[in-house]
Structure formats: structure tokens, C-alpha cells
Amino acid sequence: MTSLVIAEHDNHSIKPATLNTVTAALACGGEVHVLVAGQNAAAAAQAAAQIAGVAKVLHADADGFAHGLAEQMAAQVLALAAHYSHILFAATASGKNIAPRVAAKLDVAQVSDITKVDAPDTFERPIYAGNAIATVQATDAIKVITVRTTGFDAAAASGGSAAVESVSPANAAAQSQFVGSEIAKNDRPELTAAKVIVSGGRALGSAEKFKEVITPLADKLGAALGASRAAVDAGYAPNDWQVGQTGKIVAPQLYVACGISGAIQHLAGMKDSKVIVAINKDPEAPIFSVADYGLEADLFVAVPELVAAL
Amino acid sequence: MKALVAVKRVVDYNVKVRVKSDQTGVDIANVKMSMNPFDEIAVEEAVRMKEKGILSEVIVVSCGVTQCQETLRTAMAIGADRGILVETTEELQPLAVAKLLKALADKEQPGLVILGKQAIDDDCNQTGQMLAALADWPQATFASKVEMADGHALITREVDGGLETLKLSLPAVVTTDLRLNEPRYVTLPNIMKAKKKQLDIFKPEDLGVDIQPRIKTLKVSEPPKRSAGIKVADVAALVDKLKNEAKVI
């Protein structure tokens, strides 16, 4: 029994979500191998070899992997799949995009978004926006899995000394082409890996106010910025800040919700945070039912006050 | 060019489901059912493309129980031309649905298949990608913009960190994200019109598809409850609690 973890990386370093996925793979039992498929990704492969618990790193290098297209990535995983009992991806935009393609080609089911490994074939996963937890058993020979990173601790990024083995890159027909991307550059921690998150909701009223009120608090706390779906839909915050059932699932040490009412779908994305603070002027807001500390106040007054007090 | 759009009948997003006391599942008896919100966005997108003259026909498909006909009628009230129900009372998992859709795609030869990125009941986020794999077609998941240019689809996708744009050869599979469009309200005249539209019914056997579930649900339980904490009087009290009680700052 051996597991293959598909690494997420930028060709130089390994993204944090991979570390949680390695922990989930170790929980499945057996050896853990990591696939680094990229373009000039030797540095990322070396970084993967340092992850504690990893037995072997497979490094596939080709121009076709430059943008992580699902068709190319899936072809690479499929070329190796026969050697593995478990194939694990982080449940990120990238992992969710590729994993089902691999599963369908293998004619096996996929177990999405696992939060716990009960046995090598038995997993727990939230359904209905986290309002129920299903314990499921996968009956196929190869288990294709996406891992909810908040369900597993991160493996240590150093301390391992796995061998790096070069594998020949697989080729898929070029049916899709990368045209371009708009990736916002920022110096903040990544939302899903942040220890502190400051999130804003519809109550902010505009993108300008969002920036003016929420950003200073995030700066002060060294926090990542998040938003409710309502705030994203209204254009106050970019789409990749959305926390919730269909956005990012987060579990920081501290989550500060400002002007967020707390719809089920939002709670699904953040209720596993260690400490939740809610600032909202509506005493009936459902966010207060999950908050450790609720402050019933106008956020436009309370948040600047909080910034000053920290 | 035809488009196939898949729609799923799910528990309405406003309903807070309860776990059955025998832990066999969630209680969906007498609960309001609706079209999966992402699928509604998929139907809207296809209908808009037809209104722009890009598509010639929009066919909606649903797989499941007889009542899925209501979901199909709603999709036809938005503007889809006709519907197909693959009727079964058996549990359908994403791989089985992808195989059913593949069989229908073989029959209908669409240029585009549009699906919601995930269903809000099982939260799987698999079917579109699986269909693309089975058909050997390119895919663009989590779409926030769909354009057609010289026989290709230009799709903007929501990815970690921002947006990316892909150019796909056709036929292709697209799955929708929330920002793609805002579905229209269906009007009464359109609901009446939808009742007269063609709706064909198949069984999985008719399509030669094995729908055997591959994943067994052993139990469904309540998540650990998070209880409400306390309300603090002011900012100073909040800072004090965070520093001295929670010790997180």
C-alpha cells in the first residue's frame, strides 16, 4: 500500500496545502510519495523531499505543466497511478480541478474533501455545508481523494530526506491553452494557511470602505483578508477572498468577522476556527451563535477603535 | 451548436438539514427542494448564449427521481428548449451521473456541456471534470466568464489567488462559479410555456450505463456543535479577552 500526493507548488517551493495532504496520506498507512509536476521545478522537488514522512519524490518536468492544466496534470498522474493504492490532492481550486479527471479515467469514485481517515478505505467528509458529517467507505481498488486542509495538521516542511526520482513527462493532447491570468500580488499570508483572518461582509457597503476599514485591522494583526459571499458578489472584495461552503474553507487561530451576518454557507467555511470574534450591530445576527466573543457595535466605529487599541 | 446543461434537484439552500436519529442520512422528507444554485447559473448562461445567437438549442438534463421533472420545467421556464430525465430511484454518485451524461452527449453531440461546479447537498465538485475525462474533452471549471471566439471557448476561471483565462477547443465542458451571472426570475407566462416543452424520459439501462454506487455511506452524524461564547461590552473588553483569556494576540 503506497500513497501518492500531488504537490502544489510554484516550481520553487511547495504550497502549504501540500503539507496537510501529506499528513492525510500518512494516516492512510503505507509509504507516501509526492509527485512534483512542473516546469523547471527541480527546486520544488527538492523542497518536497524535505517534508517529514515523505519516502520518495517523483519529479516530472515539461513545458506543458507550466500552468497546471487539468488535462496535462491528469495525464501525468494517470501514467503513475497503477503503482498506488491512494492518490491524494489538496481540496484547493487546483486539486478539485484535476482529481475527478483522474478518478473517472481510472473508473473509480472520488472521495471529496475528507476531514478524517478512519481506516485506509474509510473517511469522514462534511456534506450539506458541514451540517452533517458522512462516514464513507470507498470500495474501489484505487482511492482518489481530495483533502480538506483544515482537517489535518501540516507535516513538517523539513526533516525529511526523500530521494528525488525523475520520471518521464506524460503528454496529453493540447485541447486547452493557457491565455493569461490576473493573480493579485500581496504580501499577506495565504488565506487558507493564515493564523489570523479578518473578514468583511456586506455591511461594509463599498470596496473603498472595505479597504479603508478592514485593511488596517488586518495589517495590525498580520492577518489574511477574507470576505463573505455577499461582499464578494457586491464587488467589495475579490472572488478568491470568499470564505464559505463554495469558497475557501479556513480554520485560523483567530477569525474576526466584521459586518458578516453569518449565513449557513459562510459558517461552513470558518466555524472550525479556534477563536471567532464577531463585530456586528444586529444583535440577532447568526454569527453571534458561533462567536466566542461577540461585540454588538457599529463596525465603522468599533474596528478603527480596535486598530487603535491593539 | 447545441449545449447540454445538467441540473440537479437538491434540498433548497435556505433549509438547514437535520441528521436522522438512526444516522442513516439526513432527513429530507417534506423539505423544500430546488434546483442546485450553480446549475441555475449554468442554465442562465446557456440561455443567454442562445439569445445571443451563439447556441442553436439548449437541452437540460437531470438524473434522479420522477420529481426531477419539476427541476427540468424550471430550467425550461428560464429558457431551455427541451429536457431529458434519466429516471431512477437508485442512489446516483458523481461517476454514475458523469457516465449518464456522457451517453447523452454521444447521442446529442453538443458543442458545449455546462454544469454547476458543485451540488450543495453532497458538496462533491466532481461531475463536470469526470464527464470531461470520460469524453476526452477539455474542461474549464469554476467559470466566471464564458466567451466564444473563432470556434473556441475563452473561459475565465476563479482560481486560488485570482483569475485565469483558458482557451478550449470544442466540444468542451464548463462548470460555473457564482460570479458567472445572476439567473433571471422565471415569469408565469414562461412557466406555462415550459409545461408544453418536450421532456423525454430514459432509464439508465436504456443508455447502457452501470450506476452501481462505488462509495458506501456507513453513517451520517451531527458535526460537533460550536456553542456561542459571550458578548463583550466594548472594544477594550474584547482586546482584554483576546490577550488574556484566548491568548491569540
Image (cartoon, coloured by chain):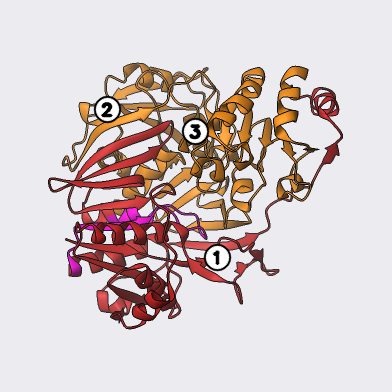
Chain colours: A orange, B red
Q: Position of residue A65 (x, y in %)?
A: 26, 30
Point out the frontmost of discs 1 and 3. Answer: 1
Residue at x-position 19% and y-position 56%: B54
Q: Which residue is mark 3?
A: A22
Question: How busy is the neighbourhood of tag 2: few (under 14 within 10 Å), some, or many (20 plus)?
Answer: some
Name the side, left or right, on which B210 lies relative to A295: left
**Precedes in sequence: disc 2 or disc 3:** 3
Up/down of A216 relative to B122, above or below: above
Name the side, left or right, on which A284 lies relative to A101: right
The kind of secondary structure element at disc 2 is loop
Is residue B97 one of those drawn in magenta?
no
The magenta-colored residue range is: B108-131
What amino acid type is highlighted by mark number 2? Ala
Which chain is disc 1 placed on? B
Q: Are marks 1 and 3 in contact (CB under 8 Å)?
A: no
Give the number of the disc on residue A66. 2
**Quarter residue B244 falls in:** top right
What amino acid type is highlighted by mark number 3? Val
Residue at x-position 25% and y-position 28%: A167
What amino acid type is highlighted by mark number 1? Asp
Q: Position of residue A47 (x, y in %)?
A: 42, 18
Up/down of A108 relative to A223, above or below: below
Q: Which residue is mark 1?
A: B12
How far is the residue under mark 1 from the one under mark 3? 36 Å
Q: Are marks 2 and 3 in contact (CB under 8 Å)?
A: no
Point out the frontmost of discs 2 and 1. Answer: 1
Tally the numbered discs. 3
